[in-house]
Amino acid sequence: MKDVIYTNEIGQFPHLSSNGNKYIPVAICIGSNYITMEPMKDRSEMQIITVNQKILDRLNVAGLSTQKHNLGNECSAEFN
């Protein structure tokens, strides 16, 4: 099943988590109603790419594939 996925970051939180994370990107797949999130330490280009790839990998493991990925945050040209 191909879905449209929307992602956006929640945060910046006022305190670091015990693992050093300050943001939580949330992903929502519209067709399947699948919601997931992945903690993120900062908004660096590498962190954004890594976290978005983890989210996409998690969707693939769940048997979902994306047709379109709408990023509600800043995105690197490398991730497109």
Image (tube, helix red, strand yellow):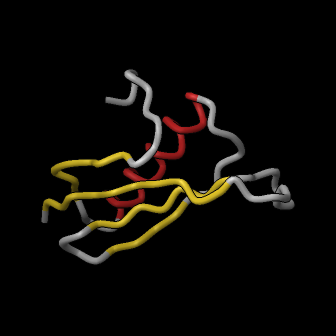
Q: Residue at x 28, y 77 (%)?
A: 33
Q: Is residue 43 above or below residue 63?
A: above
Count of labels in the image? 0
Q: Position of residue 72 (x, y in %)?
A: 40, 49
Q: Residue furthest top?
A: 77
Q: Quadrant of the N terminus?
A: bottom left
Q: Quadrant of residue 64?
A: bottom left
Q: Closest to the observer: 75 or 55?
A: 75
In the foreground, 41 or 62: 41
Left or right, 35 with respect to 17, comes to left
Q: Residue at x 23, y 75 (%)?
A: 32
Which quadrant would the C terminus be assigned to in this image? Answer: top left
- Position of residue 48 relative to residue 61, above or below, is above
Q: How far across and how far down the image is residue 23, in percent?
A: 66, 54
Which of the 4 image quadrants contains residue 18? bottom right
Question: Residue drawn at (36%, 46%), measured in percent from left and top?
Answer: 71
State left or right for residue 51 relative to residue 14.
left
Quarter residue 2 falls in: bottom left
Residue found 43% across the figure and 33% down from its top: 75
Residue 41, x across and y down, in percent: 71, 45
Question: Horizontal placement of 76 versus 50: left or right?
Answer: left
